[in-house]
Image: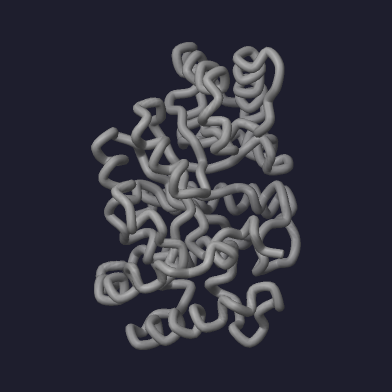
Amino acid sequence: MPSKLCLGTVQFGLKYGINNAIGRQPVKTETFDLLKKAIDLGITTFDTASVYGNAEDLLGDFNIAKDSVKVISKLKPNIMDDIVNNVIKEVERSLKRLKLALIDGYLLHDAKDFYRQEIMKGLQICKEKSLVKNIGVSVYGVEDALNAVKSGLIDYIQIPYNVFDQRLNETDFFELADKNKVKVFARSAFLQGLLLMDIDKLPAHLIEARPYLEKFNNITNDYGYSRSEAAFLFSYCNPSIDKVVFGVETKQQLEFNLKIVSESDGFKGCYDELYNRFNKIERKIIVPSLWN
């Protein structure tokens, strides 16, 4: 169902990913066409951030408020001095750029900020002032994810999760999130394009991913799926994930992803085969910030 999907907007504001389909950012008219198409197809949640170039401005110029959809945005890292007030001002700036009266979710972009009491106090005040409905954090590491869902301080959490990055499956993260009523957003279903790359054209710094990609390719072939279908469905079919955050550069990609989820009923066998089969992959492969 499209309601489990959340369209990311980093591609609209920045050139992003190692396997970008068009080799550039979409222009403004292309972005507006994509947003309209996504809403027409039933997508009701959009993910953005103040540091995604001009993505917030584009959503505001599109007049995203008219469509009664939910927008998730994020606080820029490294706020210093008069922290509480500056957090509130950052939220107000995002609201102005987005042309919204209320942001459904506002997350910390840097998990280190979760441990700064003044930052969290600022977010809580924004929630009390009805500037944001839900607050949370975007994480990269397992320890931060566990600390956040145990804290009782957040409503939303965004995690990296894909066929290769199953670190959280080895913990009680999903059980804790459910217990504490934290909604889980999973991003990086394609691992920034690595899961879809031509195995024979891997860049030198990712050559160690080759045996894992070959294994992934063999499993998906056995079940009659392409790697792109299996990668997307792997996150989508996890019942503990509330929203799958994904990005596109073209309407064709958007339609393809919607078609994949409409045909997800037969994926269980492949899902079970992939689940926990890639849980020992080196961090330098599954954490994009460590790539070259």
Which residue is nearer to you in this view: 143 or 85? Answer: 143
Residue 224 horizontal side relative to residue 257, left or right: left
Residue at x 51% of width, y 36% of height: 72
Residue at x 73% of width, y 42% of height: 53
Residue at x 31% of width, y 40% of height: 177
Q: Where does residue 78 sit, x and y in percent of width and height?
A: 68, 30
Q: Is residue 28 above or below residue 124?
A: below
Q: Quadrant of residue 201?
A: bottom right
Which residue is nearer to you in this view: 18 or 20? Answer: 18
Residue at x 62% of width, y 38% of height: 49
Q: Quadrant of residue 101?
A: top right
Quarter of the figure that contains the C terminus: bottom right
Q: Quadrant of residue 267?
A: bottom left
Q: Is residue 86 above or below residue 193?
A: above
Q: Is residue 175 above or below residue 129?
A: below
Q: Where does residue 165 sit, x and y in percent of width and height?
A: 46, 62
Q: Where does residue 151 sit, x and y in percent of width and height?
A: 37, 29
Snapshot colouring: one colour
Q: Where does residue 96 sit, x and y in percent of width and height?
A: 65, 23
